[in-house]
Amino acid sequence: MEKPAYKRILLKLSGEALMGEQGLGIDPNVVDRLAREIKSVVDLGVQVGVVIGGGNIFRGLSASARGMDRVQADYMGMLATVINALALQDYLERYNVYTRVQSAIKMEEVAEPFIRRRAIRHLEKGRVVIFAAGTGNPYFTTDTAASLRAIEIEADVILKGTKVDGVYDSDPALNKNAKRYETLTYMDIVRQGLKVMDATAATLCMDNSLPIIVYNITVPGNLRRIVLGENIGTKVTGVSHEA
């Protein structure tokens, strides 16, 4: 059996990753493919935690910019992440992957409350744990939630799945000469304002020496290849190896 490079990972997915090519909502085919990707690493014996955003359903920050109360809008965004978490749980369980959803906002009928020790116990038993409702607090992004949960469960790495194959110095969709970074430091993200994670999330990772790998989730097999140690995407650590 192939030997994984990581024992425990935190997979961060944007809500937009679940909607595929449609403009809003959840594309069942995309969720099904993501479930199969996750199963492929669970089958390697890797412990998997997941944090999903809610931008495919509701985006608190943009609603706030349009005049809605920021705190109220952020809570609505947190509820959107719960919907996504339940969708992913449903598809994972179709592939016989034991899954638990833990919510930072109490809603016992649909999810467990987030309890760190219980989450770690689920992971040790081979269950995928999906962390929903962000941190449970307004003004914090799901990137920050991913960093926080990764640190709490003592994950080896955060794998941030996006629609591009890493971090670029400018938008590759607009600039054909955009340069992709193979490695970055946490401070590079903050100083250059790179769209990897917000400053709070990056600082949390930096303070706890938690590496981040940004990669293209839409390429089948990428998640498994990274877990097996292949150099894919952009790796963010404390030291840059760029020339």
Image (cartoon, rainbow, N blue to C red):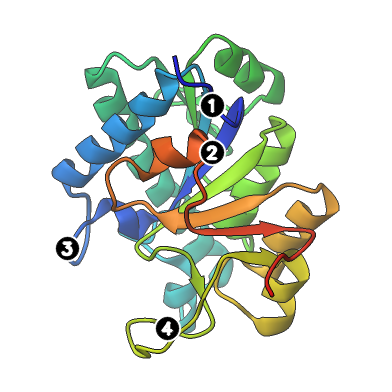
Q: Name which residue type carries label 2.
A: Gly
Q: CA distance from mark 1 to mark 2?
A: 7 Å
Q: Position of residue 84 (x, y in %)?
A: 34, 43
Q: CA distance from mark 2 to mark 3?
A: 30 Å
Quadrant housing the N terminus: top left
In this rendering, the answer to whether 95 lies above or below 161 is above
Q: CA distance from mark 3 to mark 4?
A: 19 Å
Q: Are marks 1 and 3 in contact (CB under 8 Å)?
A: no
What residue does disc 1 label? 4
Q: Name which residue type carries label 4.
A: Asp
Q: Are marks 4 and 1 in contact (CB under 8 Å)?
A: no
Mark 4 falls on what kind of element?
A: loop
Mark 3 falls on what kind of element?
A: loop
What residue does disc 4 label? 171
Q: Is residue 41 left or right of residue 201?
A: left
In this rendering, the answer to whether 175 lies above or below 57 is below
Residue 21: which disc?
Answer: 3
